[in-house]
Amino acid sequence: MNVIQYIKTLLANGEIQPAIQKMNEVAPSTYQENEAIDIAFRFSMLMQSSSSMDTDKLHREKSHLVSRINEVLERMKDQLLQNEEIMGQQYAFTPPTNTPTTADNASDTPSQVSKILFMSANPAETTVLRLSNEMREIQNTLKKSRNRDDFQFIMEPQVNNSIIRQRIKEERPEIVHFSGHGGADAGLAEGIVVNGSNGNPVVLTSNALGRLFEMAKEYVQCVVLNSCYSNAQAEAIKQHIPHVIGMSDAIEDTSARMFSVGFYEALGVGESYTEAFNSGTLAIEMEGLPGADIPVLL
């Protein structure tokens, strides 16, 4: 089974999220820049609103999205098959699983197959951040890495509280990465800013985040809070998760993005979380950007 047949099989069985993920892994850079983020965003928005839709409308919306994905597959057919041949991949998969871990027995090195759940939020009333660029650069960094087959990168743009809880429970990721605003940076209460159910920004407090990751402590090994003034939230999460990264101050958008690139470059060659953190801060410094001392590993 080649990659196109595999993705179409997923779609035919209603597995839209895995199909999008696999297409992102093997697609050319032109697709990633122009369509990957839009398709991921549309799927995320569909899942967020699914509870308020009647069955017929939800089915129609899913069918429209599947049709678009199939159209993209046809346009990229030659490039996808060429990439598949270069990577030497075979498509007779079983779903990846994560071995349960706790803070007491966790390793400093990611396990053999690591799910990375990347979530972002930039509510309408907050300063615009280039979060799609960070998401794409992390994806490209992992895709080019020596150990690219050891990672599954899952994208969830513009999350709200419900989606955060749902996706962590569904995916059981080893690494959870959040990018967006800290509450203090956005002129709100201390915490992490996400989309509210009414579309307005809401703040996830340290206590709420601590409780969230207490429920996920069996499988999450590392949490990255790539948002300004997130150190207090990182400390709350650290009570349950062995490796947590927060920001001790406001950090420029470009510096935050460069930290992510350096961090995942290191993970992509098999280095530990501590080594990856050092690689992230070094990447900021080597680019001549400010803020190399702002990320904090707990």
Image (tube, helix red, strand yellow):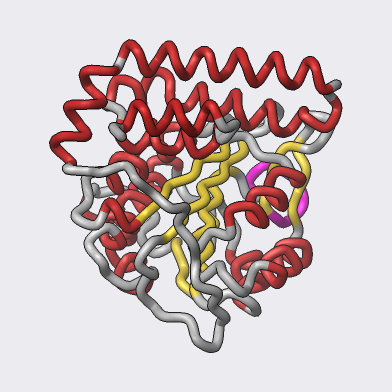
Is 89 drawn above or below residue 130 in the view shown? below
> In the current view of this chain or complex, which residue is farthest to the left?
86
Residue 210, given in percent of the width and then of the height, sits at: 71, 69
Residues 118 and 68: in front is 68
Q: Position of residue 54 (x, y in %)?
A: 85, 21
How many numbered marks have been drawn onto this rendered protein structure? Answer: 0
Observer able to see residue 245: no
Quadrant location, the N terminus: top left
Classify 124 as above or below 234: above
- Residue 179 horizontal side relative to residue 57, left or right: left
Q: Position of residue 236 (x, y in %)?
A: 67, 72
State the residue at coordinates (39%, 70%).
Answer: 111
Q: Residue at x 55, y 67 (%)?
A: 220
Please name whichever residue, 265 or 153, is drawn nearer the observer in this view of the structure.
153
* 129 versus 295 height, above or below: above
Dominant SS of magenta comes to: loop
**Numbered range of the magenta stretch:** 185-191
Is residue 71 left or right of 234 when viewed as pictured? Answer: left
Q: In the figure, 239 relative to 73: above or below? A: below
- Work out which residue is located at the far bottom of the displayed protein and give it: 104
188 part of magenta stretch = yes
Task: Specify the quadrant of the image occupied by residue 269.
Answer: bottom left
| Point 18% across, 41% down: residue | 87
Residue 191's x, y, as percent? Answer: 70, 55
Q: Is residue 271 left or right of residue 53?
A: left
Residue at the spot 74% in from the left edge and 53% down from the top edge: 204
Residue 90 shown in magenta: no
